[in-house]
Image: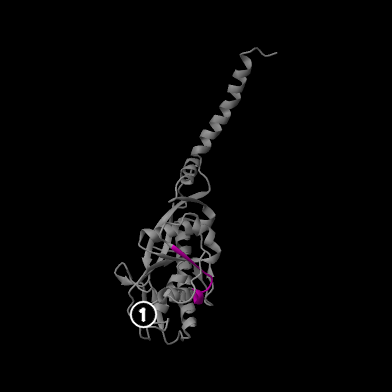
């Protein structure tokens, strides 16, 4: 039989392990990465003093606008993320928590991950070049395209690389350029056939794009919902599924004729 004082004490004693457990969880490492808007780079311009796109074997034209590929920055794979970090990011629009395995390949060292990302970028550049030349009906044996972009890994710049190559080669068939003098940003993988694929982190990439002056953002159509979640004011989303669709949308924006898709 408990006295009047015994029950509160029992409850307090039972609560103590819970408090300890919560306190421990707040500082215990979790399998997540903390991400935020990363750098953007104009594929029509230079990176570290060198052109991002260099073309030989065919005439190229000057361009007036910008095509900015976008990135996210993530904590390194060996950096611990705690429950406190997760809760903090929940209340911020410029930070997000992503499963670590969705950012970095699991079971690999930091050096192996860097090598993997470099390989992904190289494959993306090759696919982007092939997609652009296929779109233009040009032979890759006659034209050499070199793509250089330092400190960026992964495949998500593929679409912007392809658009940059097309723009430099005059692929819209007009005297103007694809951007119409605008700063246009975007993201998306691409395969040699010109199919655009999803990439992840688009809500952070839209923020990076707006920060660096973009007014238009090309987004893989299947990621429209994520892109709209934290869309900065003044940034227009244009969903795309193919390289041809992206070119058509940019041409419609430049000419003011035709329809431009929206999310």
How would you rate the neighbour count of disc 1 (Cα within 10 Å): few for under 14, some for 14-19, many for 20 or more? some
Q: Residue furthest right?
A: 1
Q: Is 106 on the left or on the right of 178, as rendered?
A: right
Say which residue appears at 57% left-offset and 28% top-offset. Answer: 17
Q: Please provide percent x and percent y for residue 80.
A: 47, 46
Residue closest to the far front: 257
The quadrant in which residue 71 appears is bottom left
Q: Nearer the viewer, residue 16 or 237?
A: 237
Is 240 covered by the magenta stretch? yes
Q: Is residue 121 above or below residue 130?
A: above
The residue that appears at 36% across and 58% down in the rendered structure is: 211
Task: Find the magenta span and give its range.
Answer: 236-245
Q: Secondary structure at mark 1?
A: loop
Asked whether the viewer can see residue 108, the reply is no
In the image: residue 46, left or right of residue 233: left
The reply to whether the magenta stretch includes residue 32 is no
Quadrant location of the N terminus in the rendered image: top right
Front-lying residue, 109 or 172: 172
Residue at x-position 38% and y-position 70%: 43
Residue at 63% from the left image edge and 13% from the top image edge:
4
- Visible residue check, residue 176: yes
Residue 240 on image: x %, y %: 51, 70
Task: Give the colour scheme of this rendering.
Answer: one colour
Residue furthest toward the left? 49
**Foreground of the two, 115 or 40:** 40
On the image, the x and y values in percent for residue 144 come to 40, 82
| Residue assigned mark 1 | 176
Residue 21 placement (x, y as % from top left): 55, 33
């Amino acid at each position: 039989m408990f006295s009047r004082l015994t029950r509160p004490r029992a409850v307090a004693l039972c609560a103590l392990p819970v408090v300890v457990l919560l306190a421990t969880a707040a500082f215990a490492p979790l399998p997540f990465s903390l991400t935020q808007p990363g750098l953007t780079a104009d594929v029509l311009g230079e990176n570290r003093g060198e052109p991002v796109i260099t073309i030989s074997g065919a005439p190229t034209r000057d361009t007036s606008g910008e095509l900015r590929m976008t990135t996210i920055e993530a904590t390194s794979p060996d950096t611990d993320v705690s429950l406190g970090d997760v809760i903090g990011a929940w209340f911020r629009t410029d930070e997000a928590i992503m499963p670590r395995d969705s950012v970095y390949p699991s079971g690999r060292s930091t050096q192996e991950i860097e090598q993997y990302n470099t390989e992904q970028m190289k494959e993306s550049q090759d696919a982007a070049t092939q997609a652009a030349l296929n779109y233009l009906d040009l032979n890759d044996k006659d034209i050499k395209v070199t793509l250089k972009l330092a400190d960026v890994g992964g495949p998500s710049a593929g679409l912007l690389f392809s658009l940059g190559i097309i723009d430099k080669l005059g692929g819209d068939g007009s005297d103007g350029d694809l951007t119409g003098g605008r700063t246009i940003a975007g993201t998306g993988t691409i395969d040699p056939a010109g199919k655009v694929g999803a990439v992840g982190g688009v809500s952070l990439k839209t923020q990076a794009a707006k920060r660096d002056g973009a007014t238009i953002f090309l987004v893989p159509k299947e990621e429209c919902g994520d892109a709209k979640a934290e869309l900065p004011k003044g940034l227009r989303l244009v969903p795309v599924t193919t390289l041809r669709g992206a070119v058509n949308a940019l041409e419609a924006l430049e000419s003011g004729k035709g329809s431009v898709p929206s999310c």
